[in-house]
Amino acid sequence: MASTGVPELCGDGTALDLHCLDHDTSKTILGIDVALDGDGGNISALYKLLNDTVITLLTACDEVLLPSAPEHSRPSAPPAACEKATTAYHQLFHLLVTLTASTPTIRTAALSAIAAFRDDQETRKKDTTADLGHLLIQLALVNATADKHSDDATFHRDIPWETSRGLAGPFLQEALIRNAKWVVLHDSSLEFMESGESARRQHVTFQHSLPFLRLLMLQCYFTRPVVEKYTRIKIERELGFPTDDAAETLLCEVAKIYNVDSWRGVFEYVRYEKGAQWDGRQTCQVLKESIVESGRRGYHVSTRRRRRNKAKVAQEPFEFSSSLYSYLQR
């Protein structure tokens, strides 16, 4: 059976081994066999490659830009890493769009997953939605391929990031809940809930959340160009190659991300205006509720100190009635 695929370039300039076989549901991507079932359900390998591209870039930047970076780190590492990541991400996303055109059920499955995550709090848990990074890629795919004039009605609908029916609120809620485990691991005193606003809680939680927050901002950035600048038709016409200034733009964005030093700055960068308008009391409430919900779900285990001081905690009950979800949605 003849192959209709052509070699594409990976981030390091090597050939991307892509074999798309006619009348077959078998694909080989970077040496990984991806068997597309009738619903395009096993496309997760491609989502993982896209997500890993962002994680690899962040790791490369950490090695150079953080204060703990060794002095012998090459100054050219961030530009080189940005160039590789930009090329790899756009090429892989082009592949995803191409597969979606031939297998529309990939988009249908992504749309259903996003809608379920947005509307059903149970669906947001780890046992149902294992990787939040994959969800952002699905959102980019759905919005980049939306076409209200398509003969296929499944391509008419998109999902916004921020509106009353958008993904931002529920997504950030779940991201903060999952991150709470690592915050408590660094400072177990944050399990004790003070009343009202706490500048210390905001500062300490932010400092211990920086790796997570930088990854979150970088993941959000990568979904923007493919949605805002590259329509489905343009992606196909340019074969997934980024614009000439894409790597330089990414380098500037990396610098912005590493300079963000507040919760407001994070919410502004990920374009969540409601969060950027929170005062200190509301931000603290969200951070406290994240820890409480993480413990309820079993994402982290309370410390021995907290178990020994149940009486103290009971004297200062934490009010969960305000609901993190309502904060993030209003």
Image (cartoon, helix red, strand yellow):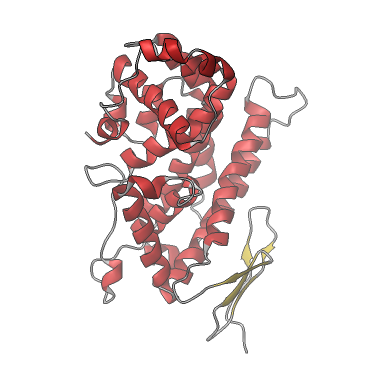
Q: Residue at x 39, y 32 (%)?
A: 269
Residue 121 location, quadrant: top left
Image quadrant containing the C terminus: top left
- In the image, residue 6 lies at what x, y percent? 60, 74
Q: Residue at x 26, y 62 (%)?
A: 157
Q: Is residue 126 visible?
A: yes
- In the image, residue 88 lies at what x, y percent? 58, 54
Q: Residue at x 27, y 24 (%)?
A: 277
Q: Residue furthest right?
A: 72
Q: Residue at x 47, y 30 (%)?
A: 295
Image quadrant containing the N terminus: bottom right
- In the image, residue 24 lies at what x, y percent? 55, 83
Left or right side of 79 for 275: left
- Using the image, determine if residue 82 lies above or below residue 281: below
Residue 145 location, quadrant: bottom left
Left or right side of 59 for 219: left
Q: Nearer the viewer, residue 216 or 223?
A: 216
Q: Nearer the viewer, residue 266 or 124?
A: 124
Q: Is residue 217 visible?
A: no
Left or right side of 253 for 142: left
- In the image, residue 267 lies at what x, y percent? 36, 30
- Using the image, determine if residue 167 lies above or below residue 22: above
Q: Residue furthest bottom?
A: 1
